[in-house]
Amino acid sequence: MRAEPITCYRPRPEAAAEFTTLPYDVFDRAGAAAHVAAHPTSFLAVERPEATFPPDHDMYADDVYQRAHDVLAERVADGTLLRDGTPCYYLYRLIKGGHEQTGIVAACALDDYANGIVRRHELTRPEKVDDRVRHIEATGCQTGPIFLAYRDNPVMEALVEAAKLSDPLYDFTDEQGVRHTVWRVARPAAVESFRAMFAYVPCAYIVDGHHRAAAAARVCQRMRTEGGEGHTGEEAYNYLLCALFPTSQLVVEPYNRVVADAAGLDEAGLVSALEGAGMLVGARRAEPVWPSGRGRFGMYAFGGWRELSYVGERPDDPAGSLDASILQDRVLGPVLGVADPREDPRVSFAGGVEGPEGLERRAGEKGVAFSLFPTTMSELMAVSDAGLLMPPKSTWLEPKLRSGLFVRRVSHRNSILDGCRRRSDEKGQ
């Protein structure tokens, strides 16, 4: 694959902890507004500009995207964001508890995304892609990295470990207790070594960021069309801001489901329907059920927990054999009437960090919650390799990458950001 060094805007080291933020899609609108109100200098005001408007303001109005541009320009003008104009790779390490993972921040060719070298496993929603397209067009930047995984490569890992012997550019701990450390790889020989090794990586897998990737691809195509005969293929818009991690270092958490009601069934009727759908239903108990392996599910309903087990044959295709697919095809669809979990307002999803108490609270007295065994990286790659799609919300990875550490300019149009940079340069910043 082709993964090039980047130039970018990045925060002053002393500002990074307060400025950077969790990814934009971790927050709902109210949560984003609350975070920005509590952290006025947060990069989330750029990622989710509607957070700075009244709650009844159209979040897709033109002035919302203009606000994203203006706040970004302000952060460049006031020196919070500095421009690093030397093409380089960055190493990005995250430590949470006893877990550690280190990725490489680079610009991956969008042609590789188009031809399946950068592989996807999830459908995108048009309105969410439209939102990120307008955000890129307004800011002229890719503002958060796509989370990619690649199969372990011992030579690449040796390069990474050698580069981590230098002093870090950033080293801070966020409010979730995750330690973030970044090293800058700018020495020409080291840059060429990383570039050469990426040529031996046959493919990479989108772990998180399908909507950002689809939006960047659409913006790229528009800019190629605008460029006409002057298009060379080397312009910044031909590449996608990514952070690439070896698969063995990634931890996938369960992504659980909650249905707001039991589709008119009482407890005995629900148990009978589940058994009729081919599930073994365990005895009711008070303590939570957290699955210990594939084919096992926890169910909270009517104030108690039960273990569900699927012992039938799994479909041959890697997507249909996932536990999330089994649950949908055997339980959510035929028993609870959830035809499409993407569209059914009765369905919500809870990442693995939200424990049993969270599922009980979400389900309440009328709902039904399900705990799942986590999808593995091997399963994710098998689905992607087969060109298939996973059910929605099949993987939840911790820790989350921070947005605002790397802001990559992709627009070929003149921008106020350039003027901000010149003024900063004149001030010696």
Image (cartoon, helix red, strand yellow):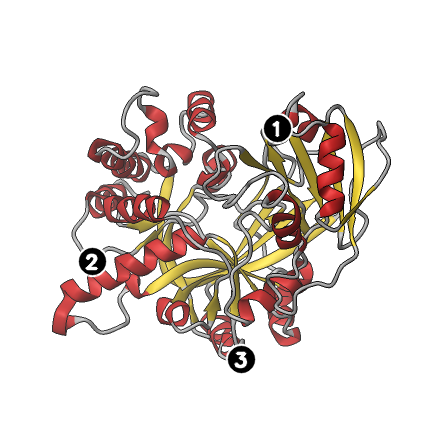
- Please name the amino acid that badge 3 sits on: Tyr
Residue at 26%, 37% in the rendered image: 65
Disc 2 residue type?
His
Residue wearing tag 3? 200
Q: Which residue is mark 1?
A: 264
Q: Position of residue 210 (x, y in %)?
A: 44, 54
Relative to 31, does residue 13 appear above or below in the rendering? below
Question: Mark 1 is on which residue type?
Answer: Gly
Task: Return the disc, 3 or 1, that comes first in the chain's sequence.
Answer: 3
The residue beneath circle 2 is 412
Q: In this picture, is 121 found above or below 264?
A: below
Q: Which quarter of the figure has residue 70?
A: top left
Which image quadrant is residue 201 in? bottom right
Answer above or below: position of 422 versus 355: below
Mark-to-mark CA distance, 3 and 2 = 30 Å
Can you tell which of label 3 and label 1 is closer to the viewer? 1
Q: Secondary structure at mark 2?
A: loop
Q: SS for tag 1? A: loop
Task: Find the distance from the CA under tag 3 to the CA under tag 1.
Answer: 55 Å
Quarter of the image with the C terminus in it = top left
